[in-house]
């Protein structure tokens, strides 16, 4: 190869190097938003589409969305925040958020990120109380926007109702007294051995009965959204009604034998219980796995106290937050708005986003008995926002188990509960 050819080759190499370097500079000049979210196969496609929509609108921005196993997501967020890592935004459930709120890890909602002038205008983009119930409200300020909001309703086996001489159209229980009566008729013992509960919840894990009792507390007029409200409730005589409504199912009415099985979702699906109270709209898909025909069951509104407040089952969900470490908070809020802008895509898969742009006709077409879920979501009970929630729910459930398994009096167990809560708080 002669000298002239060598010069041509060297010039080509130089040009390619310069173009490559320019590309790297342009790439490094892009703003990067790093978001921590949970992974779920069907929903990942919708979320990735939102990322693509945002990047097409902002070609100078790259979104790095980390899709994590839900069981590990909160811990990964803790690590990133503690290490001052690259974390612009993240998703938390309402049962996780108190810890992060108390530590001051989130920024308040910035209306500019939504092209709004006031926080109220942003709040009005979602159904009433959905931010509060899904965890985005803390000490008088709004920090998160709802990404998902679900609620527990009751589920009842209509085939068992018919076997017991009940009419599924007219005998769905509306009060707790009616619930006791209906479930008693569907309870089955053979040879002195329980084979079907009229009602069941998981007696091995405190969280499930605690969530039911949270709804009972709201119906009794208690504020269990805050630690202050919770602590005040244990000094009110009506707290006995919250506890005994659950314990009477095992003791007074004998519609629940905790020894028959542990998992109420499985127990209902395998027809070992006629009712349970810890299933949301997603339970249709779970039910299919157990082989119980959908035509043999129906969701129902949570029973109410005849003289109580009009609250349904517990509300739970996730909010999206902007981190205090966000490099461009306003831009990050705009991304989160885009991420939470596809409620009609999610509802097709049975996943409820409480944004007002949700097509209610599509929701009805996508989720069997959506009317019940929709009406009850609007009346969902708020869950306790506390960093001590795990300890509190253990103490509350322990107060009930002392009655069920030890035969302790109601007054004595409540006195012990007060001691336990005063120690925890």
Image (cartoon, grey):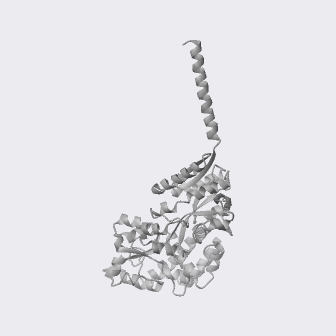
Whether residue 103 appears in this view of the structure is no
Instruction: Please identify the residue farthest to the top as the structure is shown.
Output: 2
Q: Which residue is rendered at x = 42% and y = 69% of the image? A: 265
* 211 relative to 272 in the view: left or right: right
Place residue 188 in its image quadrant: bottom left
Q: Which residue is rendered at x = 39% and y = 71% of the image? A: 268
Instruction: Indicate the position of residue 293 as horizontal and vertical percent values.
Output: 33, 70
Instruction: Indicate the position of residue 249 as horizontal and vertical percent values.
Output: 45, 81
Instruction: Indicate the position of residue 370 as horizontal and vertical percent values.
Output: 45, 71
- The quadrant of the image that shows the C terminus is bottom right
Is 6 or 300 nearer to us in this picture?
6
* 282 relative to 240 in the view: left or right: left
Instruction: Please identify the residue farthest to the bottom as the structure is shown.
Output: 307
- The quadrant of the image that shows the N terminus is top right
Place residue 322 in its image quadrant: bottom right
Is 276 or 284 nearer to us in this picture?
284
Q: Which residue is rendered at x = 68% and y = 70% of the image? A: 140
> How many dots with numbers?
0
Instruction: Indicate the position of residue 285 as horizontal and vertical percent values.
Output: 40, 64
* 278 relative to 224 in the view: left or right: left
Whether residue 26 appears in this view of the structure is yes
Residue 247 against residue 355 in the figure, above or below:
below
Residue 144 against residue 239 in the figure, above or below:
above
């Amino acid at each position: 190869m002669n000298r002239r050819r060598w010069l041509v080759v060297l010039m080509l190499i130089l040009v390619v190097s310069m173009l490559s370097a320019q590309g790297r500079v342009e790439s490094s000049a892009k703003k990067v938003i790093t978001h921590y979210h949970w992974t779920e196969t069907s929903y990942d496609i919708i979320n990735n589409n939102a990322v693509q929509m945002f990047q097409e609108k902002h070609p100078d921005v790259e979104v790095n969305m980390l899709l994590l196993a839900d069981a590990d997501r909160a811990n990964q967020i803790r690590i990133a925040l503690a290490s001052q890592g690259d974390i612009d935004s993240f998703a938390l459930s309402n049962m996780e958020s108190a810890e992060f709120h108390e530590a001051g890890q989130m920024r308040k909602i910035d209306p500019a990120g939504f092209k709004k002038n006031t926080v109220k205008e942003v709040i009005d983009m979602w159904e009433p109380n959905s931010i509060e119930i899904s965890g985005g409200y803390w000490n008088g300020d709004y920090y998160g926007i709802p990404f998902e909001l679900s609620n527990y309703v009751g589920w009842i086996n209509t085939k068992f109702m018919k076997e017991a001489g009940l009419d599924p159209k007219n005998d769905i229980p509306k009060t707790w007294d009616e619930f006791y009566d209906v479930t008693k008729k569907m309870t089955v013992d053979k040879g002195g051995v329980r084979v079907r509960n009229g009602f069941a919840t998981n007696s091995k894990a405190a969280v499930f009965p605690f969530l039911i009792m949270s709804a009972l507390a709201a119906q009794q007029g208690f504020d269990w959204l805050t630690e202050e409200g919770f602590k005040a409730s244990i000094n009110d005589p009506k707290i006995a009604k919250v506890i005994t409504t659950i314990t009477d199912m095992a003791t007074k009415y004998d519609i629940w034998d905790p020894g028959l099985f542990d998992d109420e979702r499985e127990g209902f699906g395998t027809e070992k219980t006629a009712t349970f109270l810890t299933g949301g709209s997603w339970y249709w898909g779970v039910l299919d796995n157990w082989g119980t025909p959908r035509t043999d069951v129906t969701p129902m509104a949570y029973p109410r106290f005849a003289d109580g407040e009009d609250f349904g089952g517990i509300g739970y969900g996730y909010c999206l937050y902007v981190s205090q470490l966000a490099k461009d908070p306003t831009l990050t809020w705009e991304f989160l708005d885009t991420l939470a802008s596809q409620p009609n895509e999610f509802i097709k898969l049975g996943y409820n986003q409480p944004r007002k742009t949700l097509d209610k006709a599509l929701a009805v077409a996508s989720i069997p008995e959506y009317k019940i879920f929709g009406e009850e979501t609007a009346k969902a009970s708020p869950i306790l926002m506390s960093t001590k929630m795990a300890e509190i729910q253990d103490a509350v459930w322990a107060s009930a188990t002392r009655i069920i398994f030890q035969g302790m009096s109601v007054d004595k167990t409540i006195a012990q509960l007060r001691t336990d809560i005063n120690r925890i708080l």
